[in-house]
Image (cartoon, rainbow, N blue to C red):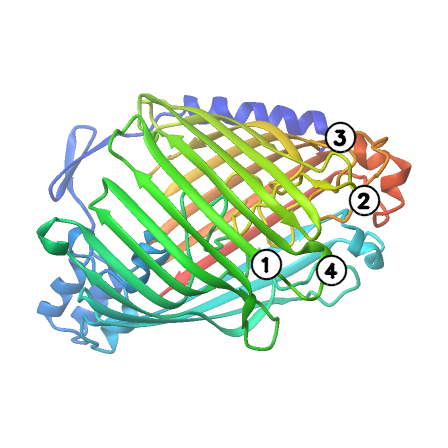
């Protein structure tokens, strides 16, 4: 497909989506109105229905498990740590084994096919520019005790591996492979209505994952094949959904592709995070994060610094404008070099009160780079343990862009043809903030700055289908129009053959949970 035809197709997508009509459905109890007709909602879960119809479970148990959503949800121990969508699904295995409510048991598997051409990373020169296609697979098992009680326990194991990754130049590291390991293992104490104040407090100790704020600095990795974990202690106090204060002291977990992951006693990570939703139009986060990461393998990259900042935002709603502003600042040392860096983020969006509820949002990010590499001041922002796929690019074997040394404006259109479908088109332009600093994690750098800063722009198309709570599918395509930076002789000499040619990335995945 030529660039001209790709852009024509891209521009027609929003017009097609906005111009397509669909039948409106207004829900009232167990009925829905479709045009001039009323029909009963089909809300029965087919697997639970099969279990009841075959006598596997009783009618009473069927109604119990069917109602365990919303206010009747049995909250697992990691509900305060991670997004609810990651841990809530119908527990078919638990129900089929007739386990009581105070035991949690679940299995998850996600399998993906992905491929991209014209690799650009310096480390992939051995592949001589060949296309990299892999099949990452991530499997999880979780076992919990305690139900909704005050004392709870959780074990979660994860096995991450990637098939067809043995060719020269194929991307492989511990973000892709981490076989048979402990992802979470902790105990938790939950106290409701502390001292009659109406406040809730939680104490956790052990190994756990975390989603914090909008996940730019700390995240339970979603798209990536492996997951960040931490060993330590966490405490929170909250008042319903109005406000919450979290504090943690941890040691980071070092991933190994085949051996059991180890606690890194020389890497201390701690912080506090406050969230306020007192005003729907002025929701606020404020945080401080400390890192003392003294890895013995590379003395020059010891990270000892503080990150502090805040976030203001309004949740998107039909017929209303929304926004998000986040600012982060880092001070400290990287090795023997002073470290001062910052990151600025802005979103301006509007969700139209139209069929498919289209939302158009404009983005702008600035992540500082190192102005004079080799001097006494390091200026490259460190995104710590954050995620990127939700607003930058798919990660896994792809993921060229990081929140460091980057300037990127862009826009995104999101539509919902049905509650279970999300269609998305994204376009972003990419520049280096400092032309003399390294480009992301590619290993590419022109210390003279003569290669310029234009990294090009990319277009991403994505479709997500939520078949049920227990199954979802995700497919996407990205075309990266590479900029003049990659045509520079200094950069060409560092890349695989053809690394300056535009790259295409495609993936298709399915996740099943029982």
Decide: few, some or many residues near mark 2? Use Cα within 10 Å; few <14, some 14-19, many ≥20.
many
The residue that mark 3 highlights is: 453
In the picture, measured across the screen, residue 58 lies left or right of residue 114, that is left
Image marks 4 and 2: residues in contact by CB distance under 8 Å: no
| Residue highlighted by disc 1 | 293
Quadrant placement of the N terminus: top right
Q: Point out the tag, 4 or 1, that comes first from the N-terminus.
A: 4
Q: Give the alpha-carbon distance from disc 4 to disc 3, as whole Å.
A: 27 Å
Q: Earlier in the sequence, mark 4 or mark 2?
A: 4
Q: Who's the residue at 30% across and 25% down the image? A: 281
Q: Position of residue 354 (x, y in %)?
A: 33, 23
Q: CA distance from mark 4 to mark 1?
A: 29 Å
Sequence-wise, the earlier of marks 4 and 3 is: 4
Q: Which residue is mark 4?
A: 170
Give SS at disc 3: loop
Quadrant of residue 191 in the image? bottom left
In front here: 400 or 306? Answer: 306
Disc 4 or disc 1, which is closer to the eye?
1
Q: Give the vertical position of 97 relative to 391 (above or below).
A: below
Point out the tag, 2 or 3, that comes first from the N-terminus: 3
Report crowding for label 4: few under 14, some 14 to 19, many 20 or more residues within 10 A (C-alpha). many
């Amino acid at each position: 497909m030529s660039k001209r035809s790709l852009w024509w197709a891209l521009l027609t997508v929003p017009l097609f989506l906005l111009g397509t009509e669909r039948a409106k459905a207004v829900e009232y109890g167990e009925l829905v109105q479709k045009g001039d007709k009323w029909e009963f909602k089909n809300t029965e879960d087919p697997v639970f229905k099969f279990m009841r119809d075959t006598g596997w479970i009783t009618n009473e148990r069927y109604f119990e498990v069917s109602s365990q959503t919303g206010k009747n949800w049995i909250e697992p121990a990691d509900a305060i740590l991670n997004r609810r969508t990651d841990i809530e699904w119908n527990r078919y295995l638990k129900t089929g084994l007739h386990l009581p409510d105070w035991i949690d048991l679940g299995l998850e598997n996600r399998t993906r096919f992905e491929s991209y051409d014209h690799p650009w990373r310096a480390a992939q020169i051995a592949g001589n520019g060949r296309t990299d296609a892999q099949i990452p697979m991530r499997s999880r098992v979780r076992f919990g005790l305690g139900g909704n009680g005050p004392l709870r326990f959780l074990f979660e194991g994860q096995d991450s591996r990637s098939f067809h990754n043995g060719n020269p130049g194929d991307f492989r590291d511990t973000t892709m492979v981490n076989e048979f390991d402990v992802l979470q293992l902790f105990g938790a104490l939950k106290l409701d209505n502390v001292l009659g104040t109406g406040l809730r407090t939680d104490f956790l100790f052990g190994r756990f994952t975390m989603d914090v704020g909008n996940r730019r600095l700390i995240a339970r990795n979603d798209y990536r094949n492996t997951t960040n974990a931490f060993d330590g202690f966490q405490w929170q106090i909250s008042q319903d959904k109005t406000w919450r204060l979290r504090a943690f002291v941890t040691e980071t977990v070092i991933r190994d592709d085949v051996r059991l992951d180890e606690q890194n006693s020389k890497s201390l990570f701690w912080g506090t995070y406050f969230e306020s939703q007192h005003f729907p139009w002025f929701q606020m986060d404020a945080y401080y994060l400390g890192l003392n990461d003294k890895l013995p393998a590379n003395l020059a990259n010891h990270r000892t610094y503080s990150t502090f900042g805040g976030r203001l935002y309004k949740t998107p709603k039909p017929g209303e404008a929304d926004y998000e502003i986040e600012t982060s600042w880092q001070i400290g040392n990287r090795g023997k070099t002073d470290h001062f860096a910052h990151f600025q983020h802005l979103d301006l969006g509007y969700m139209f009160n139209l069929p498919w509820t289209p939302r158009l949002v404009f983005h702008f990010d600035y992540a500082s780079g190192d102005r004079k590499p080799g001097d006494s001041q390091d200026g490259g922002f460190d995104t710590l343990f954050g995620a990127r796929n939700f607003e930058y690019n798919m990660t896994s074997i792809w993921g060229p862009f990081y929140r460091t040394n980057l300037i990127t404006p862009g826009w995104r259109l999101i539509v919902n043809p049905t509650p279970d479908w999300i269609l998305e088109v994204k376009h972003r332009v990419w520049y280096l903030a400092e032309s003399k600093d390294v480009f992301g994690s590619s290993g590419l750098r022109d210390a003279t700055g003569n290669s310029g800063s234009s990294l090009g722009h990319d277009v991403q198309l994505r479709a997500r289908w939520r078949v049920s709570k227990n199954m979802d599918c995700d497919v996407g395509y990205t075309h990266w129009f590479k900029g003049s930076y990659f045509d520079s002789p200094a950069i060409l000499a560092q890349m695989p053959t053809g690394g300056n040619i535009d790259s295409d990335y495609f993936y298709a995945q399915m996740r099943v949970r029982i």
